[in-house]
Amino acid sequence: MNKVQILVIEDDEPVRNLITTTLKARDYHYIAADSGSSGIMMAASKNPDIILLDLGLPDMDGVEVIERIRSWTNTPIIVISARSEDSDKIAALDAGADDYLTKPFSVEELLARLRATQRRLAFMQPENERPAVFCNGNLKIDYSAGCVFMGEEELHLTPIEYKLLCVLSQNMGKVLTHRYLLENVWGSSWENDVASLRVFMATLRKKLERGTGGPRYIQTHIGIGYRMLKVE
Ligand code: CA
């Protein structure tokens, strides 16, 4: 029995039924809301583990729903929306969404995103309980010593590359927007400089993925940002 409870916020009944039928078939518990305000209320009263959210809701915009929910909880929010513009995805991710799926979506993809989010949930811990060493595949980061290893080999990263890697690893599975990375790596002096972020990301990847024949640890979302993938 899958003990994870999912809150579905979607006003379109056929889509809502498709999602809830899919969840039921996989033994997820679910609750459903057909408006932004009732979704926010359920998020507060039922404390779900994961929220699936449509952006085009009758009473308020989904981005506002994300902002309201984020004011009190970090519960993962996966956006499922017909809006496919990068700017819409960025607005949702910047507001605090964890991932997005564009309609029409496949049921298999929805389930895969849910599994990825569940793995992330298992990894998420309060900052003070975070292990001092992060492991993902052959990648090992010793946060206390500030060292990075790929297998047995120590990687020599610049301070910026190291900080980028730390932010990505501490948000494994989550899509981080350019803006989020710039703010969290460069801090207050960030000047919307996506071009230099790309350069640092390229050199970091080269060091991480040397000889592995393709992007494994870091996934690019063109025009949006990056995410660290869990490597089995
Ligand atoms: Ca809708």
Image (cartoon, grey):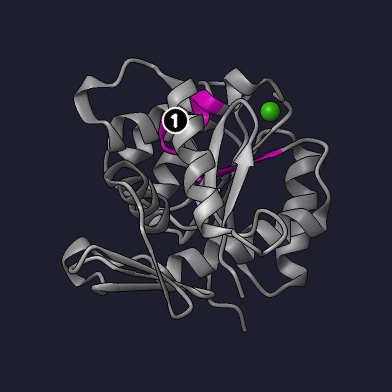
Question: Is residue 217 toward the left or the right of residue 109 in the image?
Answer: left
Residue 29, x across and y down, in percent: 59, 68
Q: Which residue: 78% across, 60% down?
A: 21
Question: Is residue 225 toward the left or the right of residue 122 in the image?
Answer: right
Q: Is 126 part of what is drawn in magenta? A: no
Label 1: how many Cα within 10 Å (few below 14, some 14–19, many 20+): many
Q: Nearer the viewer, residue 173 or 147?
A: 147
Residue 219, x across and y down, in percent: 61, 48
Question: Is residue 203 toward the left or the right of residue 140 in the image?
Answer: right
Residue 212, x across and y down, in percent: 67, 64
Q: Which residue is mark 1?
A: 197
Depicted 41 relative to depicted 208: above or below: above
Picture quadrant where residue 180 is located: top left
Pick out the residue farthest to the bottom.
1
Q: Which residue: 36% across, 65% down?
A: 124
Q: Nearer the viewer, residue 76 or 30?
A: 76
Q: Nearer the viewer, residue 60 or 188?
A: 188
Q: Is 95 part of what is drawn in magenta? A: yes
- In this view of the protein, can residue 48 be seen by the observer? yes
Q: Which residue: 81% across, 59% down?
A: 108
User: Quadrant of the image for the C terminus?
Assistant: bottom right
Determine if the C-beta at disc 1 is less than 8 A from ligand 1.
no
Q: Nearer the viewer, residue 71 or 207?
A: 207
Depicted 10 relative to depicted 8: above or below: above
User: Quadrant of the image for the N terminus?
Assistant: bottom right
Instruction: Give the magenta range.
Output: 90-101
Pick out the residue farthest to the top.
191
- In this view of the protein, can residue 30 be seen by the observer? no
Mark 1 element type: helix
Ligand 1 occupies quarter: top right
- How many numbered badges does the structure rendering display? 1
User: Looking at numbered disc 1 in the image, what kind of residue is underneath it?
Assistant: Leu
